[in-house]
Image (spheres, rainbow, N blue to C red):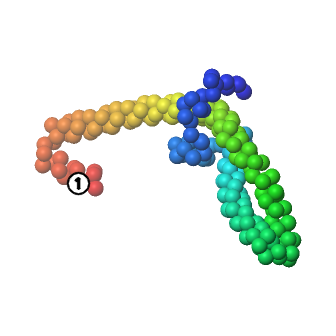
Amino acid sequence: MKNIDFKDNIVKKNKIPILIYVPEWIQLFSGNKSRSMQKIITGLEGLIARSKECESELDNLGKRKKTVMNKILYLSKDINDNNNKEALPKMEEAEKEIIMINQKLPKLMEELEAIPDRINDMNTQLLKETIRKAYELIKESRSESERSQEQVNEIRQKLAELIQKKVDAEERVNKLYSFIHGMVGADEMENLDKSFLP
């Protein structure tokens, strides 16, 4: 199998969209995917789903952080102003949650930032596999077209022969009628037609 090397990151340069969302790609390859194409597609779908998950997790963590920070402010005020000792364990719990959120957020953001490059790499791989498959299909289709053309040529030849046979037969019928007509005349010919051509 030939290796495909693109110059200067062709996918970004040519603004090639994610192939699995391109209607023309779907139409051409939905029933013609190689095993390697299918494997890449599964990976690509996984990355896209993970990107959405990360965005959702970041959004939820951001909202949760806001809620917990408000809780800390409320508890802190309660502890300082009202000397409420019962609020201390709740405060510690809230602080632990903030620490956990603060640890999770940068990891999620880092993962989310890395996903577009990974999607781009996979899309490039899919483009390469698509090109391989396209040329395979082009070769198959050309062979099929040539075979069909040969059959068309044979049918044309047969059709020409049949047309010639029909013309010859009609010509013979006309000559035979003409001969009989010349021999016996029109009236006699009508009687003969009724007898011989029921």
Q: Quadrant of the N terminus?
A: top right
Q: Is residue 137 visible?
A: yes
Does residue 12 appear to the left or right of 190 in the view shown?
Answer: right
Q: Give the residue number, with chain letter if any, for mark 1.
A: 194
Dot 1: element = helix
- Percent position (x, y) of residue 162? 38, 36
Residue 79 placement, left or right of 41 = right
- Write the residue at 67% across / 26% down: 4
Residue 84 position by quadrant: bottom right
Q: Residue 160's spot in the image, x, y percent?
A: 38, 32
- Residue 189, percent across and down? 18, 47
The residue under the point 31% across, 33% down is: 168
Q: Nearer the viewer, residue 198 or 169?
A: 169
Q: x, y percentage for residue 64?
A: 71, 63
At horizontal 33% and vertical 37% (from top left) the residue drawn is 166
The residue positioned farthest toward the top in the image shown = 7
Q: Nearer the viewer, residue 146 or 84?
A: 84
Q: Amino acid at mark 1?
A: Lys
Q: Residues within 10 Å of mark 1 (few under 14, many from 20)?
A: few
Tell me the quarter of the image containing the C terminus.
bottom left
Q: Vertical placement of 46 versus 11: above or below?
A: below
